[in-house]
Amino acid sequence: METFENISVLLVETQSAGNIGSVARAMKNFGLRRLVLVDCRTELTDEARHMACGADDLLSQSAWFFSLQEALEGFDLSIGTSSRSVQWIPTVLNPAGMADQALPLARERKIALVFGPERTGLTNEHLRFCQWLVTIPTSAEFESMNLSHAVAVLAYELAIRAKAAALGRSLDLAPLKQIEGFYRHLGECLHESGFLDELRDPRIMATLRQVFSRAALERRDVRILRGILRQWSWYAGELKKNQ
């Protein structure tokens, strides 16, 4: 996934070599390949390579920096992860919302996903370098997550959206004129059947409009639906003739 070339995972003051290895594995599972270690408090030991479980290349290619400010110099957007909110970051998202907004930007912009130390998470000093904040909705009784699990949650949300975008096609949305013609046709058929009356008409039709609006009807969809309505009208007419 080409957009992932512009997305990096930054681990700040990580203390466990095993955690770094587990993060590398989670990243590679979902297609992220750029690992940055900031003020790392451990070496990449055999434990790191063991926990990476085949993602050793991410460890060997990782970039190292002494400070978060230095590490972020080449990025266009930094997204901090934390279970708490801070007043100076107005954009606070859940993982799905983060992926929805960040993925389109990643086509042309370099994005950093910033994760804090295992024991404390990102401090206020770290978060002042972040423009967005993402919070994973964990249980209030036990909010703290393993570092690699948190990385995996965000990577998963990015991956499923990137895959959908790659496999999908552009929608051939029906023009409003065509959709309004369908609504008129639908109303006529529902009146003819006796389902609608003057009292219920506005409320029912408003609800049906909402239902079909959520479906994002394409031209072909409307043609099929109107074909069904025409067939229904013909059949109803035949029934009346035979009565």
Image: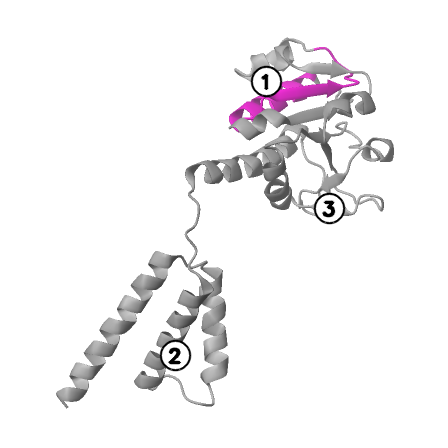
Q: Secondary structure at mark 1?
A: helix
**What is the crowding at mark 1: few (fewer than 14 residues within 10 Å), some, or many (at least 20)?**
some
SS type, badge 3: strand
Q: Position of residue 125 (x, y in %)?
A: 87, 32
Marks 2 and 1 sit apart, C-alpha to C-alpha, by 62 Å
Residue 59 or residue 209, whichever sits in front:
209
In the image, residue 34 lies at what x, y percent?
62, 21
* Precedes in sequence: disc 3 or disc 1: 1
Picture layout, residue 236 above or below residue 33: below
Say above or below: 60 vs 27: above
Q: What residue would you read off at disc 1?
A: 51
Which residue is label 2 attached to?
Answer: 187
For the C terminus, which image quadrant?
bottom left
The nearer-to-camera label among 2 and 3 is: 2
Mark 2, secondary structure of its residue: helix
Q: Foreground mark, 3 or 1?
A: 3
Neighbours of disc 3 within 10 Å: few (<14), some (14-19), many (20+): many
Q: Which residues are magenta?
A: 17-43
Eye-nearest disc, 2 or 1: 2
Name which residue lies at 61% across and 36% down. Answer: 154
Residue topped by disc 3: 92
